[in-house]
């Protein structure tokens, strides 16, 4: 049981990332000098590979659509931050903390670690502002009650999702938003923004995709990860979920675009990432 509980945390926490703006040149391209990522398995790109944890996926069929194969991304291909880094005009993917060294840390580092959680001692410190970070994109929690694993664990209420998990996510998001606005009021030389890239307008575009079945054969990790070397569906871009808990590359691309460009205050408030980068 214990591994199962731990692995549910894979998706049950928000992704937090910061855009460090040390030299903010107006029309320069890329749009930000560097990009630092903090989060859980939705953002991990290899940090867990050598850790003694069930929450790692450096085996096929993970990475079947990624040029280097399995990298530790919890996905068939690229994750949302790979797409956002591309939209920001950054040349390369942001390196995982475990593999980054030398000058490449100046472009950013990805510290995300599958199964990471929120702790008082990590959340209470202005984890980054004091070191010069001035642009913060903070992600709310997506509809975690709609993942195939959650549905198989808890059963569904209509319309096909576990309502109590989605309600918990909404509760969290509803309190996160005012906190972001407080931070903007208190720290006027920095900008924080709240993002919910799986929000209303993103989901509205997904009607044509398979939502109730994952693309790969699950049972690995605590139950929601792909089984090592198992078969996966023919065309993952027709699916919302890659495994029992994580979206496909196709969905990550939609979410990244939404976080980058959404004009809806429900999904991006007060700014989307494009506006944050230009701020
Ligand atoms: C915050 O970080 C500083 C050093 O950067 C440290 O001295 C302090 O103990 C931290 N506070 C908390 C609550 O973690
Ligand atoms: C903002 O400042 C007010 C007044 O000093 C303080 O009560 C509040 O906790 C601060 N909020 C944050 C998120 O730092
Ligand atoms: C996979 O599905 C997408 C979306 O329906 C389609 O555009 C693409 O051509 C398909 N790829 C293959 C190899 O069938």
Image (cartoon, rainbow, N blue to C red):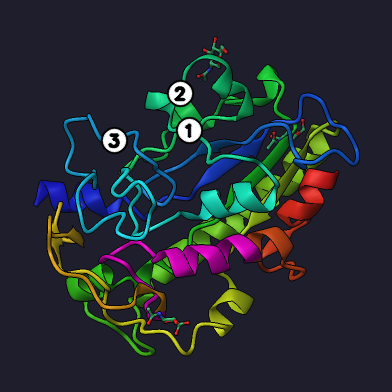
The image quadrant that residue 253 belongs to is bottom right
Where residue 94 appears, as percent x and y from the top left, is 53, 37
Q: Residue furthest right?
A: 26
Tell me the CA gap for discs 3 and 1. 13 Å
x 56%, y 22%: residue: 105
**Ligand 1 has an atom within 8 Å of the beta carbon of the residue at disc 1:** no
For numbered disc 1, what is the local secondary structure?
loop
The answer to whether the residue labelled 3 contacts the one labelled 1, judged by CB atoms less than 8 Å apart, is no
259 is higher (above) or lower (below) than 28: below
Tell me the CA gap for discs 2 and 1. 6 Å
- The quadrant in which the C terminus is found is top right
Where residue 108 appears, as percent x and y from the top left, is 58, 30
Q: Residues within 10 Å of mark 1 (few under 14, many from 20)?
A: many
Q: Which mark is residue 48?
A: 3
The answer to whether the residue labelled 2 contacts the one labelled 1, judged by CB atoms less than 8 Å apart, is yes
Eye-nearest disc, 3 or 1: 1
Q: Nearer the viewer, residue 63 or 276?
A: 63
Q: Which mark is residue 95?
A: 1
Indicate which quadrant contains ligand 3. Answer: bottom left
x 31%, y 85%: residue: 157
Tell me the CA gap for discs 2 and 3. 14 Å
Along the horizontal axis of the image, is 187 left or right of 178?
Answer: right
Where residue 84 appears, as percent x and y from the top left, is 61, 52
Q: Nearer the viewer, residue 123 or 39?
A: 39
Q: Earlier in the sequence, mark 2 or mark 1?
A: 1
Q: Earlier in the sequence, mark 3 or mark 1?
A: 3
Q: Magenta region: which residues?
A: 238-257
**Ligand 1 has an atom within 8 Å of the beta carbon of the residue at disc 3:** no
Mark 2 — residue?
A: 100
């Amino acid at each position: 049981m214990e591994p199962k509980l731990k692995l549910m945390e894979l998706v049950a926490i928000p992704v937090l990332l910061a855009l460090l703006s040390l030299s903010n040149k107006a029309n320069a391209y890329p749009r930000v000098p560097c990009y630092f990522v903090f989060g859980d398995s939705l953002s991990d790109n290899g940090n867990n590979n050598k850790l003694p944890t069930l929450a790692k996926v450096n085996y096929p069929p993970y990475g079947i659509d990624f040029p280097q194969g399995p990298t530790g991304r919890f996905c068939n291909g690229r994750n949302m931050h790979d797409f956002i880094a591309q939209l920001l005009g950054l040349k390369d993917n942001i390196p995982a903390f475990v593999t980054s060294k030398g000058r490449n840390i100046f472009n950013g580092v990805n510290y995300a670690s599958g199964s990471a959680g929120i702790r008082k001692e990590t959340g209470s410190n202005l984890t980054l502002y004091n070191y010069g970070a001035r642009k913060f994109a903070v992600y709310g929690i997506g509809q975690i009650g709609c993942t195939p694993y959650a549905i198989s664990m808890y059963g569904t209420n209509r319309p096909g999702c576990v309502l109590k998990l989605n309600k918990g996510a909404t509760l969290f998001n509803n309190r996160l938003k005012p906190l972001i606005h407080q931070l903007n009021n208190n720290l006027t030389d920095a900008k924080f923004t709240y993002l919910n890239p799986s929000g209303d307008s993103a989901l509205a575009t997904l009607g044509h995709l398979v939502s109730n079945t994952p693309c790969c054969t699950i049972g690995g990790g605590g139950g929601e990860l792909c089984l090592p070397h198992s078969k996966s569906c023919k065309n993952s871009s027709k699916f919302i979920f890659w495994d029992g808990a994580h979206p496909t590359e196709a969905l990550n691309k939609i979410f990244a675009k939404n976080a980058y460009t959404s004009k809806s205050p429900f999904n991006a408030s007060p700014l989307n990432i494009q506006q944050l980068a230009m701020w």
